[in-house]
Image: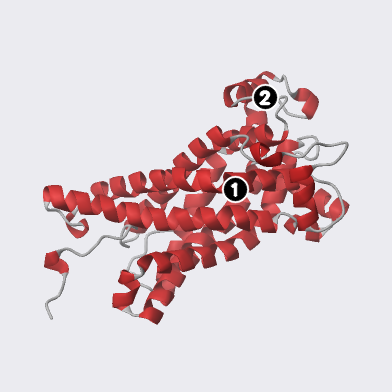
Amino acid sequence: MTTPAKKIELYSGEYFYYCGIGGILSCGLTHTFVTPLDLVKCNAQTNAKDFPGVVTGFKNIYSGKVSHLGFNSGFRGLVKGWGPTLVGYSIQGLCKFGFYEYFKYKFSKMVGEDNAWKYRDLVYLASSASAEIIADLGLCPFEAIKVRIQTNPAFASGMIDGLPKFVAQEGFANLYAGLGPLWARQVPYTIIKFMAFERIAEAIYSVIFKTTGKAKAQMNKVEQMGVVFSAGYIAGVLCGAVSHPADTMVSKINQVKMAGGIGEKMRYVYYGNAEHPGTGFSGLWKGFGPRVFMIGTLTGLQWFIYGAYKVSVGLPAPGAAAPTKAEVPSK
């Protein structure tokens, strides 16, 4: 993870390697940092009686008022699930950012330089969706463990004892029981995360150029990173809102202990039965406020860390910028 001594050739194997490392730092660190907020969000979705709100949820864990559910009091209780969070989202970040950059380059080469810019939204969409499908294969088992020990803390103390216990009791295949809802949550989220980021960054760079005459290439690193964080935060708010119902479904499904396929479990969560009422449409939106705040902050920080790492190793800051007249070659 050290800064390379020589200049990295763009779009080489080494380039994609460093993009992947940036993704590990970006996703692994930020998701682990917001574990307490994620913990409260998951329980607002699944244990609404003891977690009626964000502030109350934090107070109830810290003070020990939810010890009957298996939560430790104090800081230890608030970081429940940090282990699978760190591992799972580091793997996801490696694949998400590394493969996004790889597919964006490959798809752009396939359609040609002019078409790649003209139809850039389609390039962003295809690249981000393809990357996320791969990334979630790595994330899914650890997400299952994270949700289980966060919503049922008596199940295990952490990932080291929780993973083998989960496999022993429910089988390895059940680690992927939530893959469908996870894709439903993460693929739209990532498409917006990357498409919106690229377009918002492009718009910000355009405004700066029109008002100051400075193109992206003429801006210093601090100015570029300001654009990266701003575009990332706005994109995060948008994708957090779009992906929230699927996020609730993932949390609920990882609590379900029943035989059957993913479709049957989703119907059970939504409609319920005579003994257990389903969530219904409104129930899928529980925890919306804390999640949108969390995802907005998370995404802004992710893009900032990713951008800062790329710049630190001598690579261009992320974020597309429309070419200025001076930068368009004459024909």
Q: Quadrant of residue 61?
A: top right
Which residue: 46% across, 71% down? 103
Q: Secondary structure at mark 1?
A: helix
Which residue: 55% across, 38% down? 291
216 is higher (above) or lower (below) than 229: below
Q: Position of residue 313 (x, y in %)?
A: 35, 60
- Which amino acid, mark 2? Ile
Quadrant holding the N terminus: bottom left
Which residue: 49% across, 48% down? 239
Residue 161 visible in the snapshot: no
Q: Secondary structure at mark 2?
A: helix
Q: Residues within 10 Å of mark 2 (few under 14, many from 20)?
A: many
Quadrant holding the C terminus: bottom left
Residue 61: image tag: 2
- 230 left or right of 86 in image: left
Tell me the residue that label 1 is attached to.
86
Q: Earlier in the sequence, mark 2 or mark 1?
A: 2
- 87 left or right of 236 in image: right
Which residue: 80% across, 35% down? 154
Report the mark closest to the observer, 2 or 1.
2
Residue situated in front as seen by the camera: 2 or 284: 284
Q: In 3D space, how far apart are the residues under numbered discs 2 and 1 (Cα atoms)?
A: 21 Å
237 is higher (above) or lower (below) than 194: above
- Which amino acid, mark 1? Leu
Please say which color scheme the image uses: secondary structure
Q: Position of residue 266 (x, y in %)?
A: 75, 51
